[in-house]
């Protein structure tokens, strides 16, 4: 099989009709086998508010109660996923929308309640994604589009971090063919100074990442993204890029390698 590209888009793209339309056009232009992973954006919070279901966040992470899980499933696996699939179909991409439960694609383990109980939130092991399912879909000319909902294999759905899902899917895809992982979000890449557009860091290795962490250049929300990226590389993914969604088809951004 040809080289595989796994692309993850964040909630800021999902929330903007203009940004999402441009991304879909660019993603459609990518050649070769490809897989898309998307976050949920703010739709789940808006629906929770309308349904008078409280939204609880701990250190920026959503606590997924049973009621919140219902909302997240409706929004992530339903509205957002099918909206993206329909847009891709209109752009000539034969996409198929999936949660982790579909085809037993991705299994996860509910996160322990200690030290913090995040509710119905799942963690994915590298063995949690079925590469043979990915291979079959890609060989059939389909483009899998994964949301952030998985399952535990025992009948319970789980809400997962979309960055982690993208990393796990890329690791599984690397068992099929050489695989590149691309994280698209609202910044040009990893920046020395978020307020200076000219401070993009073009290349990061594990050694330079350790230095950036020690100096506090990389912190907060970028830490789990980069941790997932280097984990993917350590487990066989050829390269990881972190870039602005508008730069998907051009060589701009931060590249991570061993």
Image (cartoon, helix red, strand yellow):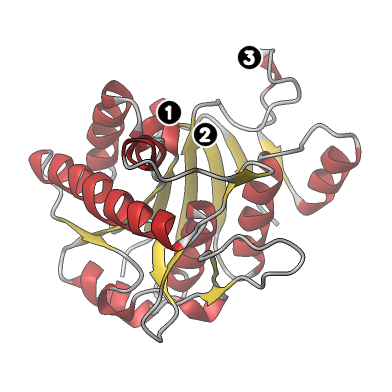
- Residue 29, by quadrant, is top left
Q: Is residue 206 above or below residue 156?
A: above
x%, y% of residue 178? 45, 65
Question: Which element type, helix, strand or loop, lies under badge 2?
Answer: strand
Which label's residue is closer to the chain start, 2 or 3? Answer: 3
C-alpha separation, residue under disc 1 versus residue under disc 3:
14 Å
Question: Which element type, helix, strand or loop, lies under badge 3?
Answer: helix
Residue under label 2: 243
Split into 4 quadrants, where in the image is the C terminus?
A: bottom right
> Which residue occupies 59% across, 63% down?
232
Inspect this view and state whether residue 38 appears.
yes
Whether pointer 1 and pointer 2 mark residues with C-beta atoms closer than 8 Å, the reply is yes
C-alpha separation, residue under disc 1 versus residue under disc 2:
7 Å
Question: Which element type, helix, strand or loop, lies under badge 1?
Answer: helix
Residue under label 3: 197
In the rendered structure, the answer to whether residue 158 lies left or right of residue 15 reads right
x%, y% of residue 153? 40, 84
Residue under label 1: 247
Specify few, some or many for label 2: CA neighbours under 10 Å numbering under 14, 14-19, or 20 or more.
Answer: many
């Amino acid at each position: 099989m040809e080289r595989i590209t796994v692309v993850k888009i964040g909630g800021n793209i999902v929330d903007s009709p203009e940004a999402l339309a441009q991304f879909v056009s660019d993603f459609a232009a990518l050649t070769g086998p490809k897989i898309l992973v998307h976050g949920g954006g703010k739709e789940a919070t808006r629906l929770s508010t309308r349904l008078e279901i409280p939204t609880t966040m701990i250190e920026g992470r959503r606590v997924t109660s049973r009621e919140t899980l219902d909302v997240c499933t409706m929004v992530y696996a339903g509205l957002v996923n099918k909206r993206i699939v329909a847009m891709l179909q209109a752009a000539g991409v034969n996409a198929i929308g999936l949660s982790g439960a579909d085809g037993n694609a991705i299994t996860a383990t509910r996160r322990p309640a200690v030290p913090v109980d995040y509710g119905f939130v799942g963690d994915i092991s590298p063995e949690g994604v079925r590469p043979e399912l990915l291979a079959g879909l890609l060989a059939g000319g389909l483009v899998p589009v994964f949301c952030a909902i998985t399952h535990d294999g025992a009948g319970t759905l789980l809400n997962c971090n979309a960055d982690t899902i993208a990393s796990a899917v890329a690791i599984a895809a690397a068992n099929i063919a050489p695989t590149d992982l691309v994280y698209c979000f609202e910044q040009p890449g990893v920046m020395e100074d978020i307020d200076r557009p000219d401070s993009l860091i073009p290349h990061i290795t594990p050694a330079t990442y350790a230095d950036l962490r020690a100096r506090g250049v990389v912190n907060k929300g970028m830490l789990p993204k980069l941790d997932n990226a280097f984990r993917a590389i350590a487990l066989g993914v050829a390269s990881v890029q972190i870039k602005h969604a508008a730069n998907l088809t051009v060589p701009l951004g931060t590249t991570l390698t061993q």
